[in-house]
Amino acid sequence: MDIKKIKRNLHNFAKEREWEKFHSPKNLSMALSCESAELLEHFQWLTEEQSKKLSPETLTEVGEEIADILLYAFRLCDVLDLDISRIVEDKFQKNIKKYPVELARGIAKKYSKKD
Amino acid sequence: MDIKKIKRNLHNFAKEREWEKFHSPKNLSMALSCESAELLEHFQWLTEEQSKKLSPETLTEVGEEIADILLYAFRLCDVLDLDISRIVEDKFQKNIKKYPVELARGIAKKYSKKD
Amino acid sequence: MDIKKIKRNLHNFAKEREWEKFHSPKNLSMALSCESAELLEHFQWLTEEQSKKLSPETLTEVGEEIADILLYAFRLCDVLDLDISRIVEDKFQKNIKKYPVELARGIAKKYSKKD
Amino acid sequence: MDIKKIKRNLHNFAKEREWEKFHSPKNLSMALSCESAELLEHFQWLTEEQSKKLSPETLTEVGEEIADILLYAFRLCDVLDLDISRIVEDKFQKNIKKYPVELARGIAKKYSKKD
């Protein structure tokens, strides 16, 4: 995935449609929450087990919802001028430090608190 | 960004901590919504203009929230065995067809309806 | 619960603190989503069974999150001049018609689609 | 609004449709987040000013989304055996103490932090 190219494509996509005026960080954060909830909706009445065995049709729909989330997240990084690769790598390294294997192993309790 | 490597790293990160039992698609979709709301929270009382001029500290925090969203989205693609690059590219192409430049230009109304 | 009194109290609470400028419907809808996600966070790594047997401490926290949601929903009705009792009653009647007992009985599939 | 009667009606509504098996607190918290996002969706591309001047049609739709949120919140209180009036009153009193008028007046900064 050429993340810089995707960001540039999303930039041009919005520009050509004159949607830049709608794409304030505030509005894009709202769009991201809306898309996340559309993903959530697929799973709300399923058991955890059922959520692991989606039909091909549902899996396709779920994939599209995840893609919507990613596209808005990338677009938000574009308008905020954030380096996507860097924030992802930095956060991942931070999580490695925050959750040492020996302490975090199999523990839901710790994991259930806000990170 | 080497997306396959990130996915593999997230896979191992969860495996080492024995967190796979928590990472059902249902639960990960909930985590994604939680992280999206943490992003939203930064913007809830800001005007759109203020959201474009974040302080360096807030921008760092916002970047971390976006990274959390991306990491959970990648992890969800891992457990669902979805090809991240492909779903992103497919959805982007779909959006290009769905919103032709001539029809979508500057129009909030159309844009305000569910996609 | 004297719903009109609560609405009036929330109105005065915001007015006294000069928070009316922050309480646009747009911003309040964001606050509502944030509070809903704080509720969600309590349940994200729990099984459904565990979510039915909360500790007294967690139940208290969960109760406070639900209260936050209700308070913002009431406040939003205040700024939009919506009659809370009426919209609740109307929607409930609508649901009764939309989901006839004979058709909806025990069916997750139908129920899993958007209402 | 007779809140106890509404709770009882929602209880019977779910029971008659054999939906109790779907209504774990975990699942209901997901449904609440989904409904909150449907509300959010109405406002995502509107300016704050526009969100104050909704058309009658949009206002009706927005009222229905708020009603959905309230109904799920009431139903969640039913399954968790929480006293709605009490949690609302308690949280409101807590907010009064947490945000003293003199300190909170017109201050977005303080207000922008998590409560």
Image (cartoon, coloured by chain):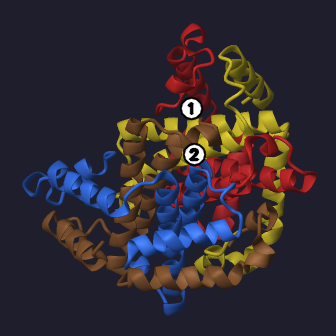
Chain colours: A blue, B brown, C yellow, D red
* Residue B17 placement: quadrant: bottom left
Amino acid type of the residue that numbered disc 1 sits on in the rendered structure: Ile
Q: Is residue A45 visible?
A: no
Which chain is home to disc 2?
A: D
- Could you tell me which residue is drawn at 37 percent across and 81 percent down? B80
Residue B48, position in %: x, y? Answer: 64, 43
Q: Which residue is mark 1?
A: D87
Determine whether the residue tagged by mark 1 lies in a helix, strand or loop: helix
Marked residue nearer the N-terminal end (1 or 2): 2
- Residue placed furthest toward the right: D56
| Residues under numbered marks 1 and 2 in contact, where contact means CB atoms less than 8 Å apart | yes
- Could you tell me which residue is drawn at 50 percent across and 41 percent down? B42
Judged left or right of residue B16, residue A65 is right
Is the residue A28 above or below the residue A63 in the image? above
Residue B70, position in %: x, y? Answer: 39, 64
- Could you tell me which residue is drawn at 80 percent across and 76 percent down? B103
Residue B65, position in %: x, y? Answer: 40, 51
Is the residue C81 above or below the residue C100 in the image? above
Residue A29 versus residue A9: which sits nearer the camera? A9
Q: Which residue is mark 2?
A: D77
